[in-house]
């Protein structure tokens, strides 16, 4: 394998890993929001608890922008 092929493979695997993290975080956000809606108490969740999930779900986008 050439060096460029290895680099492409590495970047693709990193992107795939980020996508999987994004799917997991999106699913967990939906679970949290659904649980809170059933409890009718939005004050339990503040932005600081959701921010890491949002960052994880946006990570593929940021990977494309900032590479």
Image (spheres, rainbow, N blue to C red):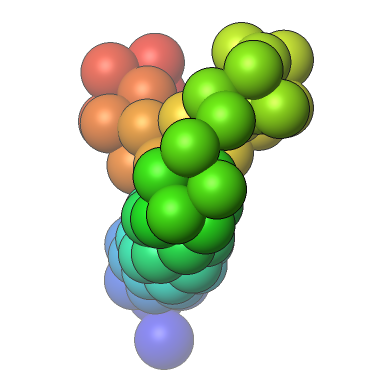
Residue 27 as seen in the image, left or right of residue 14: left
Seen from the viewer's position, the closer of residues 43 and 19 is 43
- Report the residue that reaches farthest toward the front: 40
- Give the residue at x 39% y 16%: 66
Which quadrant of the figure has residue 8? bottom left
Residue 44 as seen in the image, left or right of residue 6: right
- Give the residue at x 48% y 37%: 40
Residue 16: percent from left, percent from top: 38, 68
- Quick check: can you spot residue 33? no
24 lies above or below 62: below
- Give the residue at x 28% y 31%: 61
Residue 21 as seen in the image, left or right of residue 50: left
Seen from the viewer's position, the closer of residues 14 and 41 is 41
Residue 46: percent from left, percent from top: 66, 15
- Report the residue that reaches farthest toward the bottom: 1
Residue 65: percent from left, percent from top: 28, 18
Q: Quadrant of the N terminus?
A: bottom left
57 lies above or below 47: below
- Give the residue at x 44% y 54%: 38
Number of numbered markers: 0
Residue 17 as seen in the image, left or right of residue 50: left
- Quick check: can you spot residue 64? yes
55 lies above or below 60: above
Residue 59: percent from left, percent from top: 44, 36
Seen from the viewer's position, the closer of residues 26 and 66 is 26
Q: Quadrant of the C terminus?
A: top left
């Amino acid at each position: 394998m050439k060096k460029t092929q290895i680099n492409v493979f590495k970047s693709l695997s990193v992107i795939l890993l980020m996508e999987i993290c994004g799917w997991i975080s999106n699913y967990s956000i939906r679970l949290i929001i659904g649980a809170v809606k059933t409890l009718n108490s939005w004050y339990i969740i503040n932005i600081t608890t959701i921010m890491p999930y949002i960052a994880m779900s946006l990570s593929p986008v940021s990977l494309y922008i900032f590479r």
